[in-house]
Amino acid sequence: MVAPVWHTTESQRIFNQAQRLMPGGVSSPVRAFKSVGGQPIVFDRVQGAYAWDVDGNRYVDYVGTWGPAICGHAHPEVIEAICTAAQKGTSFGAPCRLENVLAEMVIAAVPSIEMVRFVNSGTEACMGALRLARAFTGREKILKFEGCYHGHADTFLVKAGSGVATLGLPDSPGVPKSVTAATLTAPYNDLTAVKALFREYPGEIATVILEPVVGNAGFILPQREFLMGLREITQQDGALLMFDEVMTGFRIHYGGAQAYFDITPDLTTLGKIIGGGLPVGAYGGRREIMELVAPAGPMYQAGTLSGNPLAMTAGIKTLELLGKPGVYEQLEQVTSRLVQGLQGIADELGHPMCSGNLSGMFGFFFTPGPVTNYEQAKASDVQKFSRFHRGMLERGIYLAPSQFEAGFTSLAHGEAEVDATLAAAREVLSALPR
């Protein structure tokens, strides 16, 4: 699966140059490989289930540009649609018919969404949805969960996962205490802690926001009773329930995690997949809430590139592909085979590991488990993960460069890619100390 002699000379040269030009040499922190050691490889191109670096090495890619490449990298139908749309221009800054088309598809698919606002990133979607929740309820406090990441807005950088966890930063310098004073936190899957906070702050919490399936503290599944409890508590208190489905939307189910678990929140944020690999985000919810958004209402939010015709086009084509019969069954089959294979090898070779998946999303921790929250995730053997990551990389398998990130498969991954991955994992785990 790799070049005859694996080398990264050109990647190292380019990254060394990048470090003189950009903070840490990257445009997003996790890419820097800080938690797994060594220098990152520099991609040159992607196609299907594979990525090639600038030195010519080929990798089975389980990052999938952090989720959007669910149909496979550079899917020919998506690329053709983008190229056709680009002939009409790359940005309008004006209403576009394509917005209506994608909006109708999103509203038809996601149970909680009756109206939608397109933005340019998941972070922007969560920022807008939070402002909307506060405007609708007239309350300021929010409740988030330890290890859940909702973008890099000041309000959310409290016990966040993702890159903050990877780099070991407790929060972030530059975030005023006055901004985070209204942010409450609780352990994920801990309904007792949530109830205690609502008793302490009755009628003060505007929204409870969470990843319905955690992907930014590693892969952590929710207990359905936990989601049901949140729905009940928020309804009783008059708070809004917000699902951050930037990662899970259209990945684990066509209608997102809320359709899979049959729990309907008040607000939902989306991203990644609905842009088909181009920058996009969205937030939506009940009509009575969304009609507060300007210009229909007084809550202001705007964006020059929002509803960009290229992103809308890529999203429309991607959702069309995902709407075909058997798509999610295929993702589940491939991902389950991968995860069960990894778990079986680890068990056979005596490496404590727990793992899981849901459709095309997966993860594993080097700990006996189970892992149901961020504190338990932090107890896993991150040093072993680092060594495992490097060994897999050298054998042509590209995993997320952090223990605290989920992995992703695509419709382009098949038996050959899974077989190659399991063969590499056996070699690497056989060489690692128990």
Image: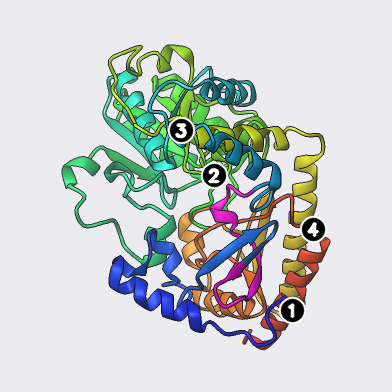
Q: Which of marks 3 and 1 is nearer the N terminus?
A: 3
Q: Which residue is under mark 1?
A: 426
Q: Which residue is drawn at 60% across and 55% down?
A: 64
Look at the image and give the residue range highlighted in magenta: 52-69
Q: Is residue 59 magenta?
A: yes
Q: Does the magenta stretch include residue 35?
A: no
Q: Which residue is under mark 3?
A: 308
Tell me: residue 194, above or below residue 158: above
Give the label on residue 139, or none.
Answer: none
Front tag of 4 and 2: 4
Q: Which residue is under mark 2?
A: 247
Q: In the shown orientation, is residue 168 left or right of residue 213?
A: left
Q: Is mark 1 on a helix, strand or loop?
A: helix
Q: In the shown orientation, is residue 38 left or right of residue 4?
A: left
Q: Which of marks 4 and 1 is nearer the N terminus?
A: 4
Give the label on residue 414, or none.
Answer: 4
